[in-house]
Image (cartoon, rainbow, N blue to C red):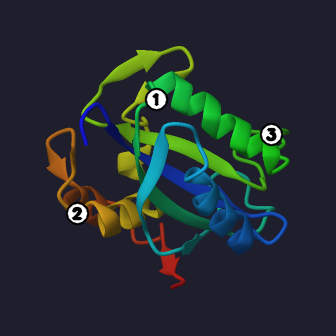
């Protein structure tokens, strides 16, 4: 498809039936303007980053093809978070839905609202595993996704749910 860009979106939830929150959000990605979902990883369960006084997270990654610009796609993802009653009460705190724009084609972007690739993608197993499931050919900063994931500490575990 010409004039479409491939974007990868990280999804996470640990509130209000997180498995259903993530599954519903995956379906809703197809309703974004000028965008359609092309693949989705299995769901994973992971311990929270930051405050440990919260439930584990359900995570996945979806690939979409879009004609939106990166910032327009970010706006759409943030609106989708709001439809899921996302509250931003504390950094890395519990949430009904978290959508992160991880990659957008091969674009490097450093904007006040958005950095691409997402600056944490290569150090988060709960992102690398599902991303590797749907796009094993991708590399970040000159290294394969497998190389990045094998370099992470064993204590940073994720569990495949489906």
Mark 3: few, some, or many residues within 10 Å (few <14, many ≥20)?
few
Compared to residue 10, the image places residue 110 above or below, namely above
Instruction: Name the spot of residue 32 as percent of width and height, x first.
Output: 59, 43
Question: Outermost residue toward the left?
Answer: 142
Q: Which mark is residue 149?
A: none
Q: Which residue is mark 2?
A: 136
Residue at 61% over, 62% down: 27
> How many badges with numbers are in the image?
3
Task: Classify residue 68 as left or right of residue 142.
Answer: right
SS of the residue under disc 3: loop
- Closer to the N terminus: mark 3 or mark 2? 3
Residue at 33% over, 69% down: 133
SS of the residue under disc 1: loop
Residue at 62% over, 39% down: 77
Q: Which residue is mark 1?
A: 68
Mark 2: few, some, or many residues within 10 Å (few <14, many ≥20)?
some
Mark 1: few, some, or many residues within 10 Å (few <14, many ≥20)?
some
Q: Are marks 3 and 2 in contact (CB under 8 Å)?
A: no
Instruction: Name the spot of residue 100 as percent of width and height, x first.
Output: 55, 43
Front residue (pair 39, 151): 39
- Closer to the N terminus: mark 3 or mark 1? 1
Task: Classify residue 35 as left or right of residue 11.
Answer: left
Front residue (pair 140, 22): 22
Q: Which residue is mark 3?
A: 90
Task: Classify residue 69 as left or right of residue 2.
Answer: right
Nearer the viewer's eye, disc 3 or disc 2?
Answer: 2
Instruction: Name the spot of residue 127 as percent of width and height, x first.
Output: 44, 57
Instruction: Name the spot of residue 49 as percent of width and height, x first.
Output: 62, 54
């Amino acid at each position: 498809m010409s004039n479409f860009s491939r974007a990868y979106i990280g999804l996470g939830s640990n509130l209000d039936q997180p498995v259903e929150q993530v599954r519903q959000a995956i379906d809703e990605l197809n309703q974004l303007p000028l965008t359609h979902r092309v693949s989705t990883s299995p769901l994973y369960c992971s311990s929270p980053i930051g405050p440990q006084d919260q439930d584990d997270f359900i995570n996945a990654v979806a690939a979409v093809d879009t004609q939106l610009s990166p910032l327009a796609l970010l706006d759409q993802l943030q609106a989708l978070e709001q439809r899921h009653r996302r509250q931003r009460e504390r950094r890395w705190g519990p949430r009904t839905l978290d959508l992160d724009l991880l990659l957008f084609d091969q674009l490097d972007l450093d904007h006040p609202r958005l950095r691409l690739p997402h600056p944490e993608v290569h150090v988060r197993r709960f992102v690398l595993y599902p991303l590797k499931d749907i796009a094993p050919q991708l590399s970040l900063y000159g290294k394969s996704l497998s190389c990045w994931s094998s370099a992470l500490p064993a204590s940073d575990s994720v569990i495949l749910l489906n």
